[in-house]
């Protein structure tokens, strides 16, 4: 967990900055793609075209129709895996939930996914990274009436064969359910047999999701003492840290009104213990001018689209007939933006909150921000890959601080290009190099924000001649490595989020 800023005013401003960055990202950029051709993206969670909608509770095959509230919830470590599971073969993968099936809010259930061994149809031998799962499984606990969707962080169970090729693999997680509802576990297998990892530039096969068989559901009864009900959300204090645990909720099913931006599926992210406060683009610009007048932002075309939205005060791609266009979703590189040259390698932008306008910064000393303005300097990087021209380390050439100033915030948006075009060992070397440049170029007064890569896989399998470049688990692995190393290398002196 990143360090919490030391005083309230800083905390509040920090949450505003992160909140707007997150809201802009949620707005449309879940559909980003390294490849220039795109189609409307496949869902990133449990419902997939071609494998059906969420199963209704009427169609669930229950192991025990007589729900019991007398049994106490147990952790996965307390629930033995049946020996028969370990020898299953050539049968559908399924979800197994230990009893009890009825719990109170705030209790947890042990959720397991059993993936029986199946022959591979690929002539290529894939392998996961050490310590990572062979199979890429995506699973949510979905509320039948509230629209709550809780991502399940599955991990291999404590069995040696989970790390062996051509064996039945079992994944598990202790899932805490904090909202009253009946939950249906819903998910699918993205890839088997390590096919999610294209290390050494092995071609990734098209994703053919396998829906998981559901044999049980969980009912969560309301607890009068619980503070986690959706109805209580408007009473929670404002969030004061950037990484708050929570759940996705269908916006049109909320028991209250909110101006929070929904994602592509009409969902909003609601933390359990605090509430996010929405800000208009003008309020965000005012915040920058007052507290963060100079920001450095390193990133790819995903960052470029975020800046187009911020610097036009929300106007870019807001027209109803354009929102779902290919230019707004993922392929804006050929667009004539007009406000500034969005294709340059260094893009300094001045934002005037009073006039609600932005313009390219033209003065020679980019570190000096004009009165009544804030300035964002974008450095266009294709990750830490060798595809950058000039090479990304050249950004930090001599006199970097004198040329570009000392920002209060430096945002690094990486991963997508790295997972697509480089091997893990190359990425490790480049992250080490990046940490050194940060230490040399920024003082501890600069807050470091890691804008992680997307966790979904490419969205253009139907496009002729398309070659998939990256997958959810591969991105997740690179993301976590980046966070861990920067936190370790930069230490407690820097505030890293």
Image (tube, grey):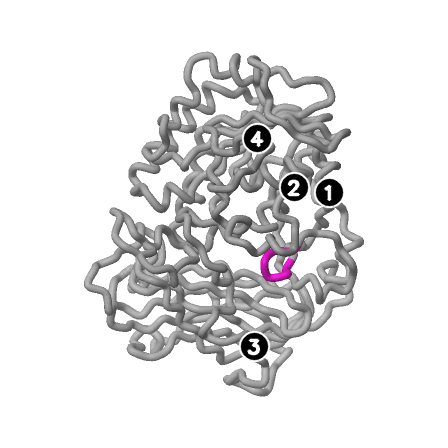
Res 359 → quadrant: top right
Report the residue marked by disc 4: 340
User: Of label 1 and label 2, which has the lower sequence position?
Assistant: 2
Inspect the magenta stretch and tell me whether residue 265 lies in it.
yes
Is residue 164 positioned above or below 286 on the image? below
Is 251 left or right of 378, judged from the image as shown? right
User: Of label 3 and label 4, which has the lower sequence position?
Assistant: 3
Q: Is residue 33 at least partly visible in the picture? A: yes
User: Of label 4 and label 1, which has the lower sequence position?
Assistant: 1
Please report the bounds of the magenta region as a residue range: 262-267
Magenta span: chief secondary structure:
loop
Report the residue marked by disc 3: 217
- For mark 2, give the secondary structure: helix
Write the residue at 47% across / 41% down.
333
The location of residue 417, given as percent across then percent down, is 39, 42
Q: Are marks 1 and 2 in contact (CB under 8 Å)?
A: yes
Q: How many marks?
A: 4
Q: Are marks 4 and 1 in contact (CB under 8 Å)?
A: no
- For mark 3, give the secondary structure: loop
Q: Nearer the viewer, residue 158 or 307?
A: 307
């Amino acid at each position: 967990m990143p360090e919490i800023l030391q005083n309230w005013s800083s905390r509040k401003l920090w949450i505003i900055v992160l909140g707007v960055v997150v809201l802009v990202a949620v707005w449309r950029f879940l559909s980003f793609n390294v490849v220039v051709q795109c189609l409307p993206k496949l869902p990133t969670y449990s419902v997939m075209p071609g494998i059906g909608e969420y199963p209704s509770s009427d169609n669930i095959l229950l192991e025990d129709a007589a729900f019991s509230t007398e049994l106490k919830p147990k952790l996965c470590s307390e629930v033995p895996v049946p020996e028969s599971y370990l020898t299953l073969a050539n049968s559908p993968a399924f979800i197994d939930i230990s009893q009890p099936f009825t719990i109170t809010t705030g209790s947890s259930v042990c959720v397991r996914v059993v993936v029986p061994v199946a022959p591979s149809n690929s002539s290529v031998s894939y392998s996961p990274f050490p310590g990572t799962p062979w199979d890429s499984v995506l699973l949510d606990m979905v509320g039948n009436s509230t629209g709550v969707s809780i991502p399940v962080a599955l991990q291999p169970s404590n069995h040696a064969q989970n790390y062996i090729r051509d064996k039945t693999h079992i994944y598990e997680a202790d899932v805490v359910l904090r909202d009253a509802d009946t939950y249906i576990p819903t998910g699918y297998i993205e890839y088997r047999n390590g096919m999610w990892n294209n290390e050494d530039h092995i071609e990734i096969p098209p994703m053919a999701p396998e829906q998981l068989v559901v044999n049980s559901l969980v009912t969560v009864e309301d607890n009068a003492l619980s503070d986690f009900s959706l109805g209580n959300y408007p009473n929670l204090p404002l969030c004061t840290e950037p990484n708050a645990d929570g759940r996705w909720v269908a916006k049109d099913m909320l028991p209250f009104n909110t101006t929070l931006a929904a994602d592509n599926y009409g969902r909003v992210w609601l933390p359990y213990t605090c509430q996010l406060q929405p800000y208009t683009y003008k309020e965000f610009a005012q915040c920058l001018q007052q507290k963060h007048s100079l920001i450095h932002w390193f990133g790819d075309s995903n960052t470029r689209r975020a800046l187009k939205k911020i610097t036009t005060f929300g106007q870019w791609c807001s027209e109803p007939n354009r929102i779902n266009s290919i230019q707004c979703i993922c392929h804006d590189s050929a667009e004539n933006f007009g406000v500034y040259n969005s294709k340059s390698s260094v893009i300094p932008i001045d934002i005037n909150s009073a006039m609600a306008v932005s313009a390219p910064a033209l003065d020679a000393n980019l570190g000096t921000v004009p009165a009544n303005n804030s300035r964002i300097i974008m450095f266009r990087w294709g990750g830490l890959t060798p595809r950058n021209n000039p090479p990304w380390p050249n950004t930090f050439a001599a006199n970097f601080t004198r040329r570009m100033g000392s920002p209060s915030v430096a945002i690094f948006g990486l991963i997508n290009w790295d997972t697509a075009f480089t091997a893990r060992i190359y990425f490790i070397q480049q992250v080490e190099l990046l940490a050194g440049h940060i230490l040399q170029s920024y003082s501890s007064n600069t807050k470091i924000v890691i804008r992680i890569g997307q966790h979904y896989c490419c969205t253009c399998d139907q496009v002729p001649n398309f070659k998939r470049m990256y997958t959810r688990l591969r991105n997740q692995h690179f993301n976590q490595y980046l966070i861990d190393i920067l936190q370790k290398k930069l230490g407690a002196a820097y505030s890293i989020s």
